[in-house]
Amino acid sequence: MSDLIAQLAILVLGPTAIVLANTQWRKAAPVVGLMSQPFWFWTTIAHHQWPVLATCFIYTGAWAFGFYNLWIKRR
């Protein structure tokens, strides 16, 4: 059951973050993207998908960079 929840969260949050990045609500994109990352980590570790796990770290860094630029960095 927990695997299904993780996959549903990925299905909803991942594409939503990408769509938001291309709209007037782009500031919300990294927040939603970061919300999806724990589910990615959970799923990849549970299924021993180590190359995908490495990719998760890259995506987390990219979303964190976006969060920093849109929410923290002073202009």
Image (cartoon, rainbow, N blue to C red):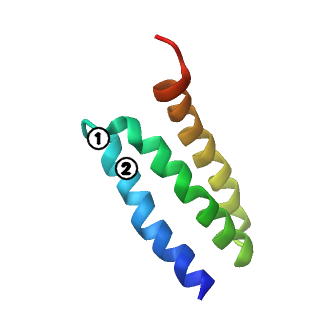
Q: Are marks 2 and 1 in contact (CB under 8 Å)?
A: yes
Label 2 sits on residue: 18
Residue 26 lies left or right of residue 37; in this view the side is left
Percent across and percent down for residue 10 are: 49, 67
The mark total stands at 2
Q: Residue at x 49, y 45 (%)?
A: 31
Judged from the image, the secondary structure of the residue bearing numbered disc 1 is loop
Report the residue that reaches farthest toward the top.
75
Percent across and percent down for residue 71 are: 49, 28
Q: Residue at x 49, y 69 (%)?
A: 9
Relative height, residue 32 to residue 23 (above, below): below
Residue 46 lies left or right of residue 37; in this view the side is right
Q: Nearer the viewer, residue 13 or 44?
A: 13
Percent across and percent down for residue 35 are: 54, 54
Q: Please identify the quarter of the rendering in which residue 73 is found.
A: top right
Callout 1 environment at 10 Å: few (<14), some (14 to 19), or many (20+)?
few
Judged from the image, the secondary structure of the residue bearing numbered disc 2 is helix
Report the Cα–Cα distance between label 2 and label 1.
7 Å
Q: In the drawing, what numbered circle is on residue 22? A: 1
- Inspect the image, locate mark 2, and give the three-letter code of the amino acid beneath it: Ile
- Inspect the image, locate mark 1, and give the three-letter code of the amino acid beneath it: Asn
